[in-house]
Image (cartoon, rainbow, N blue to C red):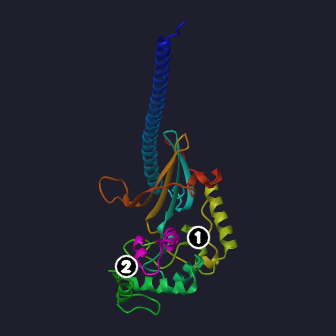
Amino acid sequence: MTFLPDFTVTRCSHRSFVNSRQGGVALVLVLWIVVLLTIMASSFSLSIRRNTELVRNAKEQAQALALAEGGLHYAMMMLSLPDPGQRWRTDGAIYEMYLAGARIRIQLYDESGKFDINNTKEDQWHLLLERLGVETEDALAVTDAALDWVDSDSFHRLNGAEKEEYEDQGLDYGPRNGPFRSIEELQLVLGVSAKLYAALEPLITVYSKQPAVDPSKASKETLLSLPGADEAMIEEYLAAREESVLNKTPPPPPPDILAQQSGDSAGIYRARVEARLDDGFIAGLMATVTPEATDSESPFGIIDWQTLVVADDSLFARSDDEAAAAGQSH
C-alpha cells in the first residue's frame, strides 16, 4: 500500500501560521497606535491644563493688581485728610482694608525717615555701611566713592574714585559730580555691589533733601543705623510706636539720643500695597508718590511705580495684630 504526502494538511498548517503571525503584527501595531494616541491625548490635555492655569494666573494677577491700585488710591485719600488724627501714619504701620471681597494691606513710609544719599555725611555713611556688615576698608572706599560722585570737583578723596579710577576698571563712565537723580544710580558707584545695593535700597532716598533722618518716620533698620542707637532702645521705641497705632493715639516721642535727629516731612511717600484674593493669590505694587497731583490724569503724583514679586516678605506674612484696621470699602 502506497502513502502519498498530505500536501493539503501541510498547506493549511502554513497558512494558519502566516495568518497567526500577521495577526500578531497587527496587534502590536494597534497597541503602538493606542499608546501613541494616549500620549498625544495626555500631552494635549496637559497643554490645555497649562494654558488654563496661565490664563487663570494672568486673570488673578490683573485682578489683584487692580485691587492693589485701588488700595493705593484709598491710602492717598487717607493721607490727604485735613484732620491729623484721622490721617494715616507714614512710619511703616500696616493698614488693612477690604475691597471687592479681597484683603488689602498697605504700608507707608515717609521718605524723610530715610538717608538722603545726596546729603548724607561721611561719618553717617561709615556707620550705615558697617551696620550692614561691610568691612571697614570697603566701607571707607564706598563712602569716599559715593561722596566723590556727588561733589562738584574732579579730585578724588583718599579712598574715593573719579573718572580715572572708573576708566581703570574698564568703565566708560565716571561720577556725575552732581546729585544722584535716583537711588538706582548708586549702583554705578565703584564698590557698590548688587548685594550691597539690595541691603541699602530700603534705607535710602533722594527726596528728603536733608542730612538728618526723622526717627519718628524711620524703619527699624534705619533707626539702628543712627548714631547712639542700640537694639534694646529701638525695640522699645518701635513697640510703643506700634501700640499707638493699634490704640489710635499720637505716636510716642523718639528716645532723647535720637531726638537730636531732625527733619520735616518730605511730603513724598513710599507705598507698598498688596491684595490677597479669596484663594490666597497675592499680588502687589511699590510706588513712590506725593499727595500733590502732577497731572490731570491722577489725583496724586506718581514718581516711581513697580510691580512686586511677592515672596516671604509679604505684608500678609505679618500677624493680624500688626495691621491696623483702616476701615472697609464696598
The residue that mark 1 highlights is: 221
Q: Which residue is at the front of the view, 211 or 133?
A: 133
Distance from Cα at disc 1 to Cα at disc 2: 24 Å
Query: Mark 1 belongs to which amino acid?
Result: Glu
Q: Residue at x 45, y 23 (%)?
A: 22
Considering the numbered disc 1 on the image, is that residue within a helix, a strand or a loop? helix
Q: Which residue is at the front of the view, 131 or 71?
A: 131
Q: Residue at x 56, y 79 (%)?
A: 134
Q: Quadrant of residue 280?
A: top right
Note whether 68 is above or below 243 in the view shown: above
In the picture, measured across the screen, residue 296 lies left or right of residue 190, that is: left
Overall secondary structure of the magenta stretch? helix
**Residue 78 x, y percent position in the rendering:** 48, 53
Residue located farthest toward the front when viewing the structure as drawn: 1
Considering the numbered disc 2 on the image, is that residue within a helix, a strand or a loop? loop
Identify the mark nearer the N-term, 1 or 2: 2
Q: Residues within 10 Å of mark 2 (few under 14, many from 20)?
A: some
Q: Residues within 10 Å of mark 1 (few under 14, many from 20)?
A: some
Q: Quadrant of residue 235?
A: bottom right
In the picture, measured across the screen, residue 67 lies left or right of residue 135, that is: left
Residue located farthest toward the left when viewing the structure as drawn: 296
**Residue 37 x, y percent position in the rendering:** 44, 30
Query: Mark 2 belongs to which amino acid?
Result: Pro
Q: Which residue is at the front of the view, 23 or 38?
A: 23
Note whether 284 is above or below 28 in the view shown: below
The residue that mark 2 highlights is: 179
Q: Which residue is at the front of the view, 223 or 249?
A: 223
- Indicate whether residue 184 is drawn in magenta: yes
The segment highlighted magenta reads 183-204
**Residue 2 x, y percent position in the rendering:** 52, 8
